[in-house]
Amino acid sequence: MKVSPRPTAGFSLIELLTVITIIGILAAIIIPSMGGARDSAQRAVDSSNLSEIGKAAMLYSTANRDALPNPTQTSRTIGGTNQAYWQWFGQIARFGGLNDPTLFVSKLDDAIDPNALPLTVLDPDVTTPPTLHPDLTALPTLSWNVVAGLRAGDPPTTPIAFTRGLRTDGTWSGEGTADDDPNRGPYGDAGGFIVFLGGNVEFFASIEDRLVSNTGRPTSNLRQAVPNRSTVRILGMDSGNGVASPNGTSALQGP
């Protein structure tokens, strides 16, 4: 008896369209959440890196009469640039043990090409005097701004370093600023980190009077949250925000 072959089963057009629609919906749900998880993971890395910067700055002070990095200290001048901003990172590399430039850059920072980073902060080919790597100083900026001229005995609420892009009103620049603009924060206007002299690292969506000024009162302006001494300068390449500048912005008297 001859048996006729059964027709091969397949999907109908409606079934295919239904499957494609379901896949599209799942992708719309999953892909943004994966991006958010990636950003959260990188922020955790950035927080850890800022913590290491704070520790290195304090370690630096133990062999420098309680003084944290300060480019105006001529006995610790680093070659390769006259800009105080880069000098600070040279000092922390030479005397604080942080010679890895990846600690100073967030992977979420569109202003910096990670492929342009040198392997070291200091140029291994120039040791007398210790000199910054030319590829480092060729970058438009790093991800963190820093405070120079602090002392180990300053209040523990004093900022040491913070995410670039902070403005005097306590918010971070983002919307309306190009992604690769040094005045923009690595996380846009979502906020930023601050590492304090007490060793704690905090993320702020907005400071909103959550800093302690040099008069002991709340302030949103980081320039009022550092000691009001002539030797204290806030360093950063995002000079358009009013908080930092390449050779230093002075402190302000708190409210």
Image: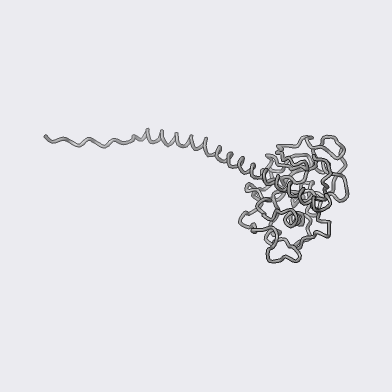
Q: Is residue 189 above or below residue 139?
A: above
Determine whether, in the image, residue 40 is placed left or right of residue 50: left
> Across the whole image, how many numbered discs are drawn on residues?
0
Q: Residue 174: image x %, image y %? A: 69, 43
Coloring basis for residues: one colour
Q: Position of residue 24 (x, y in %)?
A: 47, 37
Say which of 58 and 184 sits in front. Answer: 58
| Front-lying residue, 206 or 136 | 136
From the top left corner, tell me how far across and down residue 230 is, in percent.
Answer: 88, 50
**Residue 255 visible, this orientation:** no
Residue 41, image quadrant: top right
Tell me where residue 207 sits by quadrant: top right
Residue 60 seen anywhere in this rendered image of the structure? yes
Residue sitting farthest toward the front: 63
The quadrant in which the C terminus is found is top right
Image coords of residue 112 (percent x, y) = 65, 53
Q: Is residue 161 left or right of residue 252?
A: left
What residue sits 72% from the left and 61% below the top?
Answer: 132
Seen at 69% across and 49% down, the residue is 143
Q: Quadrant of the N terminus?
A: top left
